[in-house]
Image (cartoon, rainbow, N blue to C red):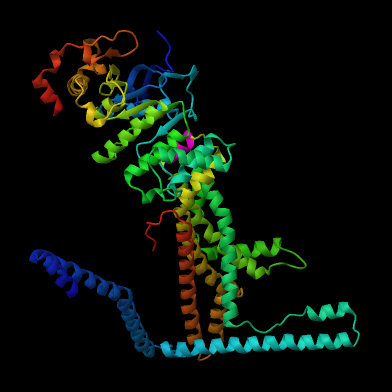
Amino acid sequence: MTSHFVEVEGLAKRFPAPGKGEALTVFENASFGIDKGEFVCIIGHSGCGKSTILNILAGLDQASEGVVVMNGKEVAGPSLERGVVFQNYSLLPWRSTLRNITFAVQARWPRWSRDKVIEHSLRFLELVGLQGVEQRKPSQLSGGMRQRVSIARAFATQPQLLLMDEPFGALDALTRGMIQEELIRIWEETHQTVFMITHDVDEAILLADRILLMTNGPQARVAESVQVAIPRPRQRTDIIHHPDYYRIRNHLVISLVNRSKELSGSAVGSEPQVGKYPRVVDPTREPAADTDRTTCRQAAI
Amino acid sequence: MNILAIRSRKTFDLPLKDRLFDRLSAQSTGKTVVRLVHSLVIPVLALAIFMGLWSVGARQVETSLGVFPGPVAVMQQAGALWEEYQSEQARKADFYQRLETRVDKARAAGMPEERIERMRSRDYTGHPTFISQVVTSLGTVASGFILASIIAIPLGILIGLSNTLYEAFNPIIQLFKPVSPLAWLPLVTMVVSSLYVSQDPMFSKSFLNSALTVTLCCLWPTIINTAVGVSGVSRDLINVSRVLRLNWFTKTTRIVLPSSTPMIFTGLRLSLGIGWMVLIAAEMLAQNPGLGKFVWDEFQNGSSESLSRIMVAVLVIGLVGFMLDRLMLMLQRAVSWDKSLVLR
């Protein structure tokens, strides 16, 4: 097995039960790798521990078992090499848009001159398509703009790994689509390594090289690693016409709706896991048996 | 409103839309009237009713010092107090004028410089007027409050940041918070008179007594509110500071402090309000110069004007308290980042 840029091995999170009961296992045996420059999305139902995995990767939370190794070093706490985009933006409300970004840039490169910090920050504001709002406070921005500032802040610190916790969860569909396109464009420019949580199957297909599917918690697992072999650059409007799009989409939806239960830890026996890594699936190479029309329609609901 | 309706009829020729426009503009003028009534007419009306009730009610109360003062008597005494202040100021100016001429004469007579200095060092010792008592009280409350804030804000931050400190301090705070400041007063007086011994004191003891009593009462609301504000800093912002690897100092000054300023100011406003109330009581009880002493002196004086003069003091105390609160509010508005915050 070649070693990945980020290695996640046997991660588990357990909460001690009140009293002397058995500990509650949120997820266990989570193992996967992320390569440099790869965009990986993780999908799963609420409560399966996606956010916990992301927080452990960020160093904000600690695993009960298992390790995360990035670049050959074990993750033991937060680091500026791992940027995080939080779901609710987490901007400092008393600072202007620009100063929110300079704040992070200064923390990353304390020795930089003031001018250099501002120039660098402005460049990343421009990258997310925000100009002319540098002096506005977050409360004077729309939700979409706030999330762009948050994304600009994370990209501006140029981390080796960018972690995004459902970054578009709180946005309306139109705004979400726009920012997704911005994100694709930025990713294509920077080839930033990204690990992102999402609930949205279409979003995952649009953005990701690979999608990790988690089973339901408790005792959730990372069950599958689904390849998204759709060529880049991708566009929201074009990608749905790609012949493989619906095969991938249906596979994901079916897994989420039907199979996540049977894949869950309580029924491990039914789906034997080969090795420590999740089963690699490429829906475009699978026989089209389980993607016939009736299942399609069911799944789409 | 009519113009708008006509124009829209011409443009759109849609009766429904016209009616809508009419309704909307009528509503907006209605709103202005309502706002005017709320902001001006109602308070003025309430004040007038209050004055009337006061005037009528006061006449019914016969005290040993005469009839309880109504608004007119109080107004007269307010004028009289102002005149007293003016004449006292004039006397003071006179005193210094005379002093200067004497100094000039002495210098012309070839008096040694050190004796002239001694002459100069003599201060005017007129009796304090109402206005000067107000100024004294303001100075005392400001000193006590500022001292309390200097202690309470950092302490509140530390307590809010650390669970251990919180557990250590919480019982002490809970114990002392409900203590009436006047219970402190004798203790403060004794401690100050035994510890603050100096030939040439920078502050008078009475000032220290009052100010320290104010401090003791101003501490608690600020500590508690600061600690609550600090411990309530959003988890996300703390995570941001962790991801950016901020050190303790940067985290505290750049994230914790700004995000808890609204709560800190709430504490400060409460403290200042309490401090002002406490100060008047402390001055009365301890005969320390200030508005409280003025009230007490007038009460002991027992002339036919005393009650009116006390009533003037009562109104001024209220007015000053109100202005102090507004001042804090303005400061809070200026400092606070959350402009949408409803401030009352």
Residue B162: x and y in percent read 51, 41
Looking at the picture, does residue A108 appear above or below residue B48?
above
Identify the residue at image location x=29%, y=75%.
B36
Q: Is residue B95 left or right of residue B322?
A: right
Magenta region includes residue A153: no
Specify whether residue B240 is painted magenta. Answer: yes
Quadrant of the rendered structure where residue A238 is? top left
Residue B58 in the image: state x and y as whole percent: 38, 87
Residue B191 visible in image: yes
In the depicted view, which residue is nearer to us: B17 or B214? B17
- The span shown in magenta is B235-243
A148 to the left or right of B274: left
A290 sits to left or right of A44: left
Residue A127 sits above or below residue B227 on the image: above
The N terminus of chain A lies in which quarter of the figure? top left
Q: Residue furthest front?
A: B11
Q: Quadrant of residue A261?
A: top left
Residue drawn at x 49%, y 73% as measured from the top left: B320
